[in-house]
Amino acid sequence: MKQKVALVLGSGGARGVAHIGVIESLLKNNFEITSIAGSSMGAVVGGMYAAGKLEDYKDWVTNFDKIDVFKLLDFTFSLQGFVRGEKVFKEMRNLMGDILIEEMSIPFTAIASNIRAQQEVIFEKGELMDALRASCAIPTVITPAYIDDEEIVDGGVLNPIPLNRVKRTEGDILIAVDVNSNVPFKPKVVETEDEIAKEQNYSRLIEDFRNRLKSFWPTSKEPSTPAIKKLGFFDLLNRSIDLMQERMTALQMQQIKPDMVVRISRDSCGTFEFYRSKELVEEGISAFNSAYDSYRHELERTQ
């Protein structure tokens, strides 16, 4: 008999692609996923699985290179965010079609945040793509979704790992996947000529975009300090969000203790580094194997 699992997938930008590897490993090891809840990219991957579209999504996202990712980012100079997000979600809708959450094969919950009301928005029915677009609207990065004239942003703002929102069934275990964990990560070293050429081309695109932003965001006029390397706008924003979500995740897990926690390093990639999706899937598999070994050893110890 398969062990039932209530699966909770956390937020974390492109690191959330690692959720694919975790899901594949669960199925390979004779687990049955009976419900899913997710925030941000956790909602995307969880929603794809619940809709029966995970394999299609994996084939799409793991074939990105850096230029592909850059082309999907529809930049804007809005005061509410510098990426509209419509282009990538249009591609996802073309991939998936129109799917209602309540008609999917297993219970699924996506979490977003109503920024003005300071309340969670819980999607358990309605158009799946609308829920995913809202759940991924990283504040100041991706422009908000508008639902009933309300500004809806990323689920990670209020609930980065929604342990309290997943549906439970008798006999299941609770598994959480934290893709913003403060654990060590050994980065892949760029070695081939092709990889170096792609890196240089991408760097030129990013530098051009940053130069365009200089007229939009004021730059610091303080004298530079050679001994201190100051964080740029993007790094400062990403690190602040990661730290906030790490602390919120720790508090959530103190209140609701999962039976198993799969931890992906927050240093494994940046928010938009979807060109690293293949290695992130492998990172998810590796992290699951480590967590599963610890889980089995603990079971053996307590029996």
Image (tube, grey):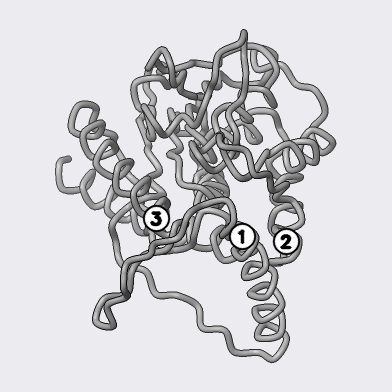
Q: Residue at left 62%, top 29%? A: 132
Amino acid on which disc 1 is placed: Ser
Crowding near the residue tagged with mark 2, few <14, some 14–19, many ≥20 C-alpha atoms within 10 Å: some
In x, y percent, where is residue 109? 52, 21
Q: Is residue 39 visible?
A: yes
Q: Is residue 299 left or right of residue 50?
A: left
Dot 1, crowdedness within 10 Å: few (<14), some or many (≥20)?
many
Image mark for residue 162: none
Q: What amino acid does circle 3 point to?
A: Ile
The amino acid on which the numbered mark 2 sits, given as a three-letter code, is Phe
Real-space Cα distance between discs 2 and 1? 8 Å
Give the residue at mark 3.
264
* Nearest the eye: 197 or 1: 197
What label does residue 277 carry, if any? 1
Q: Earlier in the sequence, mark 2 or mark 1?
A: 2
Quarter of the image for the C terminus: give it.
top left
Residues at discs 3 and 2 in contact (Cβ within 8 Å): no
Please state the horizontal and vertical placement of residue 212, each as a whole percent of the image.
65, 60
Q: Secondary structure at mark 3?
A: strand
Q: Which of marks 2 and 3 precedes in the sequence? A: 2
Numbered label attached to residue 64: 2
Lateral position of residue 297 relative to residue 167, left or right = left
Please identify the residue farthest to the top as the structure is shown.
148
| Kind of element beneath mark 2 | loop
